[in-house]
Amino acid sequence: MCATRIPTKVKPGRRKRLDPRKPPTQSRAAETVNAVIEAAARILERNGFEGYTTNAIAERAGVSIGSLYQYFPGKEAVTVALIERECALLLADVIKADSIVDYRDAVNHLIHSAVAHQMRRPRLARLLDLEESRLPIRPRIRPASDAIHETVLRILSRSDSPYRGNRKEAVLDVFAIAKGMVDASGEREETDAHQLEKRVRRAIYGYLGMRSVR
Amino acid sequence: MCATRIPTKVKPGRRKRLDPRKPPTQSRAAETVNAVIEAAARILERNGFEGYTTNAIAERAGVSIGSLYQYFPGKEAVTVALIERECALLLADVIKADSIVDYRDAVNHLIHSAVAHQMRRPRLARLLDLEESRLPIRPRIRPASDAIHETVLRILSRSDSPYRGNRKEAVLDVFAIAKGMVDASGEREETDAHQLEKRVRRAIYGYLGMRSVR
DNA sequence: AGCGCACATGAGCTTTTGCTCATATTTTAG
DNA sequence: CTAAAATATGAGCAAAAGCTCATGTGCGCT
């Protein structure tokens, strides 16, 4: 019963929240949240952006659409959560470079992390990169993203680094090179990570002015 | 009068055409087509994907929505036409590398073309790159795209090229490097093309095993 | 002049998709 | 055991966007 629906007036200027609505407190709620995020990942992997809708995500997750919206204010929030998750995974690996003493080995580890991360779920990684640059989502993803950048910056700033240029710029460029090559490789469905890694090393060594080892 | 609308049954499997519907024969029609393409470019440049709709494109072009659909079977077809146009522009510049005798100069020209192309309308170029990899549009864009790749391949295959690896692979990698760096640079709204060009050269020289000039 | 075809128009229909809310179920706490 | 809080459900609304078609206008040709 009850009255007809009051039209939802949304002021055009109003920004949509991208953070989860309620932090889940019970474990079943946490499961729901995870199921939703993983479902989103699987849909992206299988069908790309085609059919990447909230209803489809909820269905695939085996939860109702209402539940999805209980924890995420909108579709983009799900994507952001997914990006955060993947980003955290990458960070966990990247950060190990700090404990590698040899400069060259540390750089190699960074490159390896990037390539391995993209090769784990290539299509997903590539599509998330696209989404990340398409949406102005930055704020929410920043923490993890910044931590990664800072790690790379730390490596490039070591006393035994031969690099003498603008280091912050170098971090961004190195990222751009790796991302560019690795995404392109994923797009044409290459599978040989080792082979790709060698090529990325060539480009980055060249950029950083490091001599290649024969 | 006449019956109620017969619901347009579209089989899910049916592919949508991406090529223009009718080739315009009169000059006013050609003008319409151009206006639509340029309107699409301007909307992408100004507002990004937000509001990039067929209705908006038609309105901005100063033509009716019906006219748009007379020449383009759908929104994506407009995007494809726009990409083709930009791609042709790039090709026209890239192809000049063939007549540059010195190998290093030729490579530099290629890099310069790529950077200049992206700097001309940075946001547009970047968004089109995104669309290009997001949509499975390849078939229509292939001709121009292939011609560009072949030019690069020709340069890398010259007898005085020191590069000894898999050349087709190198073409793709060089593209990936340039595109990655240049898109990233556009994203953070850099404006110094010359500066960027130098950095791209470092990476590509490194990849190709060319010595940098001091 | 006048016929025919290319071109142009835009109201409005269909589809798609994001999202809400009234209600039901489960869990936790006292 | 019971009440309250957390969680789950899904029919269905609203908005946005894609697209059609009946109709009108202008251009070229004989």
Image: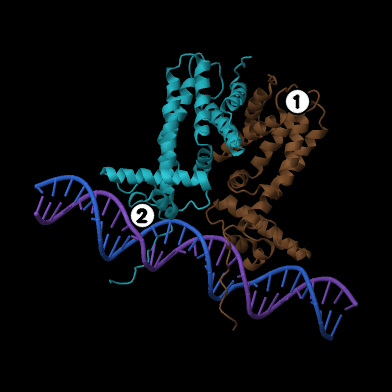
Chain colours: A cyan, B brown, C blue, D purple
In the rendered image, residue B12, in percent from the top left (x then y), is placed at 57, 59
Q: Residues within 10 Å of mark 2 (few under 14, many from 20)?
A: some
In the rendered image, residue C26, in percent from the top left (x then y), is placed at 23, 50
Chain under numbered label 2: A
Marking on residue A64? 2
* Left or right for B40, reference C16: right
| Quadrant placement of the N terminus of chain A | bottom left
Up-down: is C21 above or below B124? below
State the SS at label 1.
helix
Kind of residue at badge 2: Ser
Q: Nearer the viewer, mark 1 or mark 2?
A: 2
* Left or right for B9, reference C22: right
In the rendered image, residue B128, in percent from the top left (x then y), is placed at 62, 47
What residue does disc 1 label?
Answer: B104
In the rendered image, residue A167, in percent from the top left (x then y), is placed at 52, 24
- The structure residue drawn at horizontal position 62% and vertical position 25%, both measured from the top left corner, is A199
Indicate the quadrant where residue A65 lies. bottom left
- The structure residue drawn at horizontal position 74% and vertical position 64%, both measured from the top left corner, is B29
Indicate the quadrant where residue A100 lies. top left
Chain under numbered label 1: B
Q: Measure how far apart labels 1 and 2 are at the Cα level.
A: 60 Å
